[in-house]
């Protein structure tokens, strides 16, 4: 495959690829994805999850363009890839236990305010049927997760917010009033208040990126994509192997 295709990848002119070249790139990613199994990922605090069966809708929901097929290993360190101009790269993982994760440069892609994060998970759920948001920064005491279905948040937790808990408890949650040592005579808790943070919620709702490994079922390949159309991926030849 070291020919016109490789040259176009080297120069970032992904928009110049024809249908045959794009098919070859996907074939390359599929084959190489079978060579190594899943491994723990570090989403650097923030990621989204959508069902693998309906993930195609995420590209429109997040305004992602010029997607390029890559393996899990090639996309894992997406935040270390150079921007091209003002274009921001993000990574959509292969299907992992039935879910696709979106990670990398999300503050630049989505925004930095809570309304931005929630708006994005609602858009994702409108396009994909369901979507999850996870954001964890132990150093700052930040712990946020949300479940959205068909365009609306169904359940949300945001530490130190008012209110901290929104929506009805999910079946797997342990409620604050059920915790050992809780005494209603001396303590109070909202009826819908749970006790699970991101560390537990992600594994219950979809997949825990830090716990991926030999028992994780991986299907297909991943995608690198940009938040601007017609830009291409300059320098990808240093990342992908033909």
Image (spheres, rainbow, N blue to C red):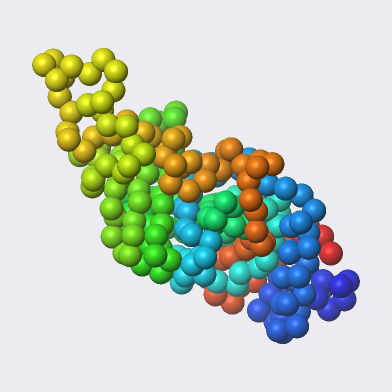
Q: Name, please, the residue furthest toward the right.
A: 2
Residue 28 is left or right of residue 169, and the answer is right
The image quadrant that residue 120 belongs to is bottom left
Q: Residue at x 32, y 32 (%)?
A: 174
Q: Position of residue 127 (x, y in %)?
A: 41, 69
Q: Name, please, the residue furthest toward the left.
A: 185
75 vs 136: above or below: below
Q: Nearer the viewer, residue 41 or 182?
A: 182
For the C terminus, the quadrant is bottom right
Q: Nearer the viewer, residue 156 or 96?
A: 96
The image quadrant that residue 67 belongs to is bottom right
Q: Residue at x 18, y 28 (%)?
A: 189
For the N terminus, the quadrant is bottom right
41 vs 187: above or below: below
Q: Position of residue 59 (x, y in %)?
A: 50, 69
Q: Nearer the viewer, residue 238 or 56?
A: 56
Camera sees residue 91: no
């Amino acid at each position: 495959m070291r020919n016109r295709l490789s040259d176009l990848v080297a120069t970032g002119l992904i928009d110049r690829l024809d249908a045959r070249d794009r098919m070859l790139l996907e074939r390359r990613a599929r084959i190489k994805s079978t060579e190594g199994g899943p491994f723990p990922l570090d989403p650097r605090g923030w990621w989204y999850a959508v069902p693998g069966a309906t993930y195609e809708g995420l590209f429109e929901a997040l305004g992602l363009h010029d997607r390029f097929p890559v393996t899990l290993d090639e996309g894992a360190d997406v935040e270390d890839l150079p921007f091209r101009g003002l274009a921001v790269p993000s990574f959509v993982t292969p299907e992992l236990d039935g879910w696709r994760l979106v990670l990398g440069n999300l503050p630049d892609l989505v925004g930095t305010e809570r309304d931005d994060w929630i708006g994005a998970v609602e858009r994702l759920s409108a396009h994909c049927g369901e979507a999850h948001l996870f954001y964890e920064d132990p150093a700052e005491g930040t712990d946020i997760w949300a479940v959205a279905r068909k365009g609306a948040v169904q359940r949300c937790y945001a530490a130190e917010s008012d209110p901290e808990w929104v929506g009805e408890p999910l079946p797997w949650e342990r409620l604050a009033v059920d915790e050992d040592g809780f005494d209603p005579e001396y303590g109070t808790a909202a009826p819908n208040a749970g006790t699970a943070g991101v560390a537990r919620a992600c594994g219950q709702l979809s997949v825990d990126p830090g716990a991926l490994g030999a028992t994780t079922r991986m299907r297909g390949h991943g995608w690198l994509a940009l938040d601007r159309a017609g830009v291409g991926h300059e320098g990808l030849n240093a990342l992908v192997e033909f």
